[in-house]
Amino acid sequence: MGIITAIIGLSMDSVIAALESALSQNPDDLTMRLHLGELLLDSNRAEAAREHFETVLQKDPANLEALQGAATVADRLGDEGKAASYKKGYVCIRCWPSCGALFHLRLTIATHILETVG
């Protein structure tokens, strides 16, 4: 059981159900989507988590949390090629400064990596 569920005294399934319900009302809430993806991973539901990380990456290709989550999902599902691509994207974005023209270049590279993964 995760620390959050232990603190609030709810089961992981209850928290996941509550987030899914809230997300149905606010489907563009990327932060909520990331939290749900993480909880699904913690519950050994990698296939379900993948949808949320990939949705975040479609809207924000340079999102480090989503890249890391997607890499973990791919690892757990045995897709080494996708995992390597997500990890490469994570490292490229994480290691470059996030300013001006470099940010645009980071975003372009991240988008290209995601297109080759898909």
Image (cartoon, rainbow, N blue to C red):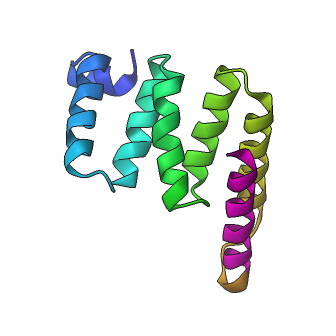
Whole-percent x, y for residue 44 in the image: 50, 16
In this view, 19 is above or below 101: above
Indicate the quadrant containing the N terminus: top left, top right, bottom left or bottom right. top left
Residue 55 is left or right of residue 96, and the answer is: left
Whole-percent x, y for residue 100 in the image: 66, 85
Residue 90 is left or right of residue 84, and the answer is: left
Q: Residue at x 21, y 42 (%)?
A: 22
Whole-percent x, y for residue 106 in the image: 71, 69
Q: Residue at x 45, y 35 (%)?
A: 37
Nearer to the camera, 14 or 57: 57
The outermost residue toward the bottom is 100
Residue 34: in magenta span = no
In this view, 63 is above or below 70: below
Find residue 97 and report its image quarter: bottom right
Q: Residue at x 38, y 24 (%)?
A: 3
Residue 4 is left or right of residue 102, and the answer is: left
Q: Which residues are magenta?
A: 102-118
Whole-percent x, y for residue 45 in the image: 48, 20
Nearer to the camera, 103 or 8: 103
Magenta segment's dominant SS is: helix
Find residue 112 and report its image quarter: bottom right
